Image: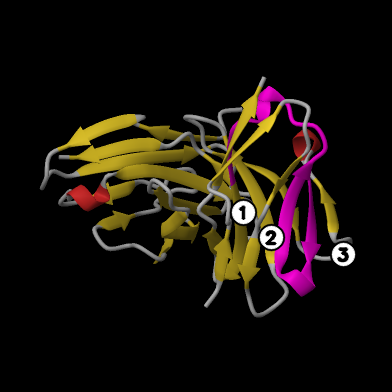
Amino acid sequence: NAGVTQTPKFRILKIGQSMTLQCTQDMNHNYMYWYRQDPGMGLKLIYYSVGAGITDKGEVPNGYNVSRSTTEDFPLRLELAAPSQTSVYFCASSSHTSTDTQYFGPGTRLTVL
Amino acid sequence: AQSVTQPDIHITVSEGASLELRCNYSYGATPYLFWYVQSPGQGLQLLLKYFSGDTLVQGIKGFEAEFKRSQSSFNLRKPSVHWSDAAEYFCAVFSGTYKYIFGTGTRLKVLA
């Protein structure tokens, strides 16, 4: 089972560039999440989705956008990269309710210079 | 405000020794509590969770955690640590509205 996959694993961006972080899950989960993890900090929720076509903001949504056109995919878009967005990004999914086990992808390490 | 505190940033134990990682939470209602482990370069993996019932919860890899409402704690324990347990451990509380609050993590080092 692939579970939750993320691409790319690493990326370096220049200030002002844009990119999309890809996330795909093959478990038919309704709930999907994007987190960022900064050194010495816990995970912070950026956006989440409770199903195809439904997304909502988390704690730290500024500078990001998401879409959920299918159950499987939940891409995260950075429109104008800033150094403050240097972080490790994790995608996760869970089954029927938000208290079900979250399954995490391996992460994308992003550096903005 | 809801919060999760992991007071120990780093912990070092010898292989075979017992382990306890501390977690304190602040949450008004009955909390849903979780422990996750993150191995280097990997995503987080659920070790165990507590929703209700028996306050001693068993998880994977020989870990257990005890919920103590009076102390607002949910400490993670393992009787005998293995070298492969070296990782970062995160405590989390479900705060409602699909959101989790994660602690800042405890990095475990295991000495051979």
Q: Dot 2 falls on which chain?
A: B
Inspect this view and state whether residue B108 appears.
yes
**Mark 1 near mark 2, Cβ–Cβ under 8 Å?**
yes
**Looking at the figure, which quarter contains the N terminus of chain A?**
top right
Q: Amino acid at mark 2?
A: Leu
Boundaries of the magenta span: B64-89
- Mark 1 and mark 2: Cα distance apart in space: 7 Å
Q: Which residue is mark 3?
A: B53
Look at 55% across and 61% down and name the residue there: B100
Q: Are marks 1 and 2 on the same chain?
A: yes
Look at 73% across and 74% down and name the residue there: B30
Residue A75, given in percent of the width and then of the height, sits at 36, 46
**Could you classify mark 1 by the number of other residues whose Cα lies within 10 Å: few (under 14), some (14-19), or many (20 or more)?**
many
Left or right: A83 as drawn, with respect to A3: left
Q: Is residue A49 above or below residue A37?
A: below
- Which quarter of the figure has residue B19? top right
Q: Amino acid at mark 1?
A: Cys
Ranked by sequence position, the earlier of labels 1 and 2 is 2
Secondary element under disc 2, as helix, strand or loop, is strand
Point out the residue furthest to the top here: B112
Quick one: A52 or A101, which is closer to the camera? A101
Look at 47% across and 30% down and name the residue there: B41
Secondary element under disc 1, as helix, strand or loop, is strand
Report the disc number at residue B91: 1
Q: Which residue is mark 2?
A: B33
- Which quarter of the figure has residue B23? bottom right
**Mark 3 near mark 1, Cβ–Cβ under 8 Å?**
no
Q: Amino acid at mark 3?
A: Gly
